[in-house]
Image (spheres, helix red, strand yellow):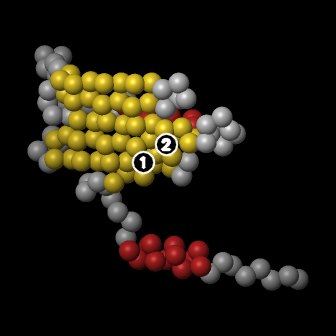
Amino acid sequence: MKFIIVLAVFVACASADVSHVATADYIVPIVRSSNEQKPDGGFNYAFETGNGIITQADGVVKNPNTEDATLQVTGSVKYVAPDGTPVELSYVADQDGYKPVGSHVPQIPELILRAQQYIASHPPVVKKL
């Protein structure tokens, strides 16, 4: 099940809407491309386009040949947004979810983080009747 969630996130990223980047009369060449599939289910790929999009990802199977086998994907993407802003994103997707890091990714406010820590360290008291 966890593998399917990670795969779904990967497919969603790969099928993102980039219609604003290319039109029928604007073809972007692939400058560099590599792809390797490993027998255990792991993989790595990288590519760079003529308009400056650079991406790479490495997938590693953790705990292979067990019921707890999971896929951990680590990757990054670099491109220039339509407004000219350079965007760099790195991420890890594993059994704990998708964790992106980048200057454009909204951050959880400090107050919320402290509240979550407080709640975790003060479990509710259950009174018996």
Extreme-right residue of the structure = 129
Please provide percent x and percent y for residue 27.
16, 18
61 or 24, which is in the foreground?
61
> Which quadrant of the structure image shows residue 105?
bottom left
Please provide percent x and percent y for residue 23: 18, 21
At label 1, the amino acid type is Val
Which residue corresponds to the image point at 77% horizontal and 80% vertical from the top-left?
126
Q: Residue at x 34, y 33 (%)?
A: 16
In the picture of the structure, the residue carrying the numbered disc 2 is 72
Q: Residues within 10 Å of mark 1 (few under 14, many from 20)?
A: many
Q: Are marks 2 and 1 in contact (CB under 8 Å)?
A: yes
Residue 119 sits above or below residue 51 on the image: below
Does 44 appear above or below 100?
above
- Which residue carries the number 1 mark? 92
Labels 2 and 1: the sequence-earlier one: 2
x 59%, y 74%: residue: 120
Q: CA distance from mark 2 to mark 1?
A: 7 Å
Residue 4 circle label: none
Horizontally, is 83 left or right of 128 in the view?
A: left
